[in-house]
Amino acid sequence: MTDIVAAVEFGGFIVAGWSLVFLLGKVKSERRQRALITLLLVYVVVISFGNAVLRINLWPFSSWDLVTRTQSGGGWPDWRTFGVTADGKEYPVDYRAFEPLNAHELGTWMLQDFVGLTREQQGKVGEYFLRQMNRARQNVRKGKEPGYLGRFLGPLVAPAHMIYPPGWLNPDDVPADRFVAVRWYRSIWDLEAMYQDMSTMRLVPLYEYSKPQ
């Protein structure tokens, strides 16, 4: 039932938004234009307030409990991926390398499910990640994007989350040599502290995979 209500709310928002765009082109009075914009804002505020009062999440009108709830232990657990070259240097990986997989879903899976796999299964996952990272590295060296969604969708591609910003923007952002290993870290961060200083993130080794020679 909640899925139906959420669909109706979101559908109403889309219809109202497109209607507003259409009407703003027809209405010349600035006062009426502001009134139309206000109606849309009222619609959004009423739905959001109603969902908050009823303590229900009807996406995208959601309270995002997963992110906003208080965490014990001083921070929020997350993950970070690094590629390692033959000389032992680490390079932060641009998560677009794993498209169409999403960094958030991957992180949740890594922290909850990956640790429960057998060593053989973990090795297969590591091999896949290493292959994707080297493919993305080669793309960037050629002046292309690391993933493929941006090449197809261009400016319409969904923006990256602030904690997973694009890192491979130029050929010099990636090493000329291939990655020989992938390292995963469990990161502990506090959003407010990171806003002031990114170095406050703590990294704890989670897993390392290197391709057998």
Image: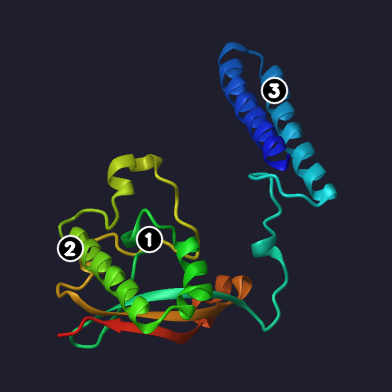
Image coordinates for residue 72, horizontal then vertical, percent? 71, 80
Disc 3 secondary structure class = helix
Q: Hey, what amino acid is under mark 2? A: Gln
Left or right: 7 as drawn, with respect to 166 = right
Identify the disc placed on residue 138.
2
| Of the image marks 3 and 2, the number of the one nearer the N terminus | 3
Please report whichever mark, 2 or 1, sits nearer to the chain's N-terminal start: 2
* Residue 152, picture quadrant: top left
- Tell me the amino acid under the disc marked 1: Pro
Please state the horizontal and vertical placement of residue 96, each as a whole percent of the image. 35, 59
Q: Of tags 2 and 1, which is closer to the observer? A: 2
Looking at the image, can residue 92 be seen?
A: no
Whole-angstrom CA distance, mark 3 to mark 2, is 50 Å
Instruction: Check the image and report above or below for 198 versus 36.
Output: below
Q: Residue at x 69, y 25 (%)?
A: 34
Find residue 94 and report its image quarter. bottom left
Residue 74 or 192: which is nearer the viewer?
74
Residue at 57% from the left image edge and 70% from the top image edge: 195
Q: Tag count in the figure?
A: 3
Q: Which mark is residue 166?
A: 1
Q: Is residue 184 above or below residue 42?
A: below
Task: Say which of 129 and 134 sits in front.
Answer: 129
Could you classify mark 1 by the number of other residues whose Cα lies within 10 Å: few (under 14), some (14-19), or many (20 or more)?
some
Classed neighbour count for the residue bearing mark 3: other residues with Cα under 10 Å, few (<14), some (14–19), many (≥20): some
